[in-house]
Image: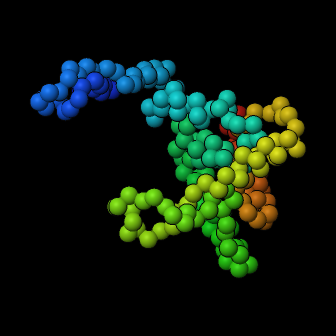
Amino acid sequence: GESGDQAGTGSGAGSGAPGAAGAGAWEEKALWTKEAMPDDGADKYGFTHFTRFENAAESCPAGLLSSDSRLRLDRAALEAGNNGEAGQAKHALEEMQRSERRLREERGELWTPRWFRVAEEADLHELEQDVGTAVWEWNGKYKAANEERVRKAGPSPQCPLDTVFNPWQFKETAEATAAGMAAEAEGSAVAGGEREGE
């Protein structure tokens, strides 16, 4: 298609490359069609309908993990257009990650991913072969573990996105995060009250 078209095209039929001797007739057909972008002005990032759906509570699986990135405060603030708040939340998250790493090093513990393993025979592109980093692959344990977790928890009436973000390995990090969130919420409530009383 021409530049700016909303569809991808491809060629089918024929026994050789276009123009090749003995090539059959080539017909052009649509392989995909781009869905129209949302026009409601609800976000400034140009998210497609698909991206919005993936970020929404409706697409969350039952038993959403508390480490799911949809629960990150910095991400939620960005989606709401609160860049300053997003920056503060991202900084706080990075500080907690550093704190968790220090705890792990102090205790001599190695971090082991729960749902991935190092690939013994990674199928790498030639440009990836000299990078020298480990390649991780899915270990297949998540589905059964999540089904068991959901079964034990039972039905939950709450919105999945109301789950508290908690990706931490150590209880101390989770408690410090919860305390920080409580203090932040209290500070916001006080600031809101001060504005109302002005």
Q: Please, is residue 31 above or below residue 152 in the view?
A: above
Residue 20 location in percent, x, y?
13, 31
* Corner quadrant of residue 156: top right
Query: Does residue 185 appear anywhere in the picture?
Result: no
Image point (55%, 63%), residue name: 119
**What is the quadrant of the C terminus in the image?**
top right
Residue farthest front in this picture: 22
* Corner quadrant of residue 27: top left
Image point (42%, 59%), residue name: 124
User: Closest to the observer: 143 or 88?
Assistant: 143
- Is residue 108 left or right of 9 when viewed as pictured? right
Residue 4 location in percent, x, y?
27, 25
Residue 30 location in percent, x, y?
34, 21
User: Closest to the observer: 195 or 90?
Assistant: 90
Query: Does residue 126 appear anywhere in the picture?
Result: yes
Image point (58%, 30%), residue name: 53
User: Closest to the observer: 97 or 24?
Assistant: 24
Image point (48%, 32%), residue name: 47
Residue 96 location in percent, x, y?
66, 62
- Is residue 24 left or right of 49 when viewed as pictured? left
